[in-house]
Image (cartoon, grey):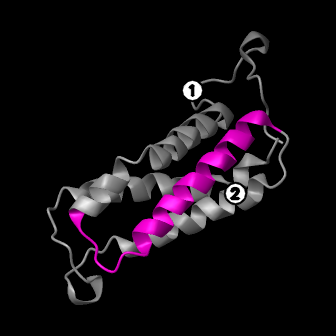
Amino acid sequence: MTDVKNLEKDIEVVESGYEFLLAYAAQGRPPHDESTYPTPHARPTLEEMLASMQNVLAALGDTEDEYEQVVAEDIRKASATLRFVLAQPLMSSELVDNLNASIHLRAVLTDFFLYSEIFKPSAQSKPTAQEEPLFKKA
């Protein structure tokens, strides 16, 4: 099992990046070259999300945990999708909206939501022996 405490920052970058992309997609921006268009720009957020996903992928490394293998495979697919969008010379709200709808990106977000919740201790109470999580932090 991977030591998840070092992954929290990268997971947060991806989650908050997705929230930014939802807002960006709602702006109705036409296809444009970001270097000549007013901010905010999607490209820096996409690059940060990609870098964070690659950090998580590297942290999972050669995991033998089945769920972490699923997460790694979903990250590979979502990373390819992000690289495809980043390779486009023009950015638009419609392009970002289609990325937001991508099953690959949504799979990673869902993986991260589940992954981070399982390993996050409850702020209200400490679990009793009967409520102990199935997996524990490494």
Q: Nearer the viewer, mark 2 or mark 1?
A: 2
Q: Secondary structure at mark 2?
A: helix
Q: Quadrant of the N terminus?
A: top right
Looking at the image, is mark 2 or mark 1 earlier in the sequence? 2
Which picture quadrant has residue 16?
A: bottom left
Q: Secondary structure at mark 1?
A: loop
Question: Residue 58's x, y, as percent?
Answer: 74, 61
Q: Is residue 57 visible?
A: yes
Instruction: Say if 22 sits above or below 120 in the image.
Output: below
* Highlighted range, magenta: 65-93
In-front residue for pair 67/14? 67
The residue that label 2 is drawn on is 57
The residue that label 1 is drawn on is 124
Instruction: Say if 53 sits above or below 105 in the image.
Output: below
Asked if the residues shown at circle 2 and circle 1 are in contact, with their CB atoms under 8 angstroms apart, the answer is: no
The crowding category of the residue bearing disc 1, from other C-alpha atoms within 10 Å (few below 14, some 14 to 19, many at least 20), is few
What amino acid does circle 2 point to? Leu
Measuring 47% from the left and 49% from the top, which residue is drawn there? 105
The crowding category of the residue bearing disc 2, from other C-alpha atoms within 10 Å (few below 14, some 14 to 19, many at least 20), is many
Question: Residue 44's x, y, as percent?
Answer: 41, 75
Which picture quadrant has residue 40?
A: bottom left
Q: Residue furthest bottom?
A: 36
How many numbered marks appear? 2
Which circle marks residue 111 in the picture? none
Mark 2 → mark 1, Cα distance in angstroms: 31 Å
Measuring 20% from the left and 83% from the top, which residue is drawn there? 37
